[in-house]
Image (cartoon, rainbow, N blue to C red):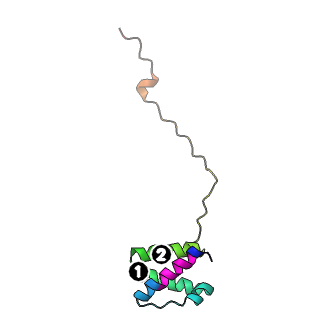
Amino acid sequence: MDNETLRLIARLKINAARAGMPVDVVRFGSDRLYAKGVLQQFSDAAEEDGVLLVLQLMDKLGMTASIKHETNVVPLPVLRPERPVAESRYVGRLR
C-alpha cells in the first residue's frame, strides 16, 4: 500500500472511532471482506465527507468495479423527410 492509502485508512479509523465504531487496521489491511463491511457500515452512518473518504478508499483498494463501454458503433437508419405536396409540383413562373 502506498502512503496515501495508509493516510486514508488512518482517517477512516479516527472518524469511525468518533462515531463509536472501532476499526482494526491490521485486519482491515489483510481481510478484504472485513474492509468491505467496515466501509459499508461507516458510509451508512457518515456525513458527506465520510462517504467521500469511503469512496476514495474503495478506489485505492480496487473495490470499485469499472464500467466497460461498448466501442461498437451501430449506424442508425437515415430518415429522409417527406416532401410536401406543394413542393413536388411545378407551380410556374410568377409575373
Amino acid at circle 2: Leu
Q: Position of residue 5 (x, y in %)?
A: 57, 76
Residue 58 point in image, percent of width and height: 55, 75
SS under mark 2? helix
| Category of crowding for the residue at label 1, using alpha-carbon neighbours closer than 10 angstroms: few (below 14), some (14–19), many (at least 20) | some
| Residue at the (50%, 73%) spot, across then down | 55
Q: Pointer 2 and pointer 1: residues touching (CB < 8 Å)?
A: yes
Rendered image: mark on residue 46: 1
Which label sits on residue 67? none
| In-front residue for pair 40/20 | 20
Question: Residue placed at 40% from the left, 74% from the top?
Answer: 48
Q: Quick check: is 9 in the magenta stretch?
A: yes
**Disc 2: CA contacts within 10 A as few (<14), some (14-19) or many (>=20):** many
Tell me where residue 72 appears, x and y as whole percent: 64, 53
Tell whether 66 sits left or right of 41. right
Quick check: is 78 in the magenta stretch? no
The residue at which mark 2 appears reads as 53
Type of amino acid under label 1: Ala
Q: The N terminus appears in which quarter of the rendering? A: bottom right
Magenta span:
5-13
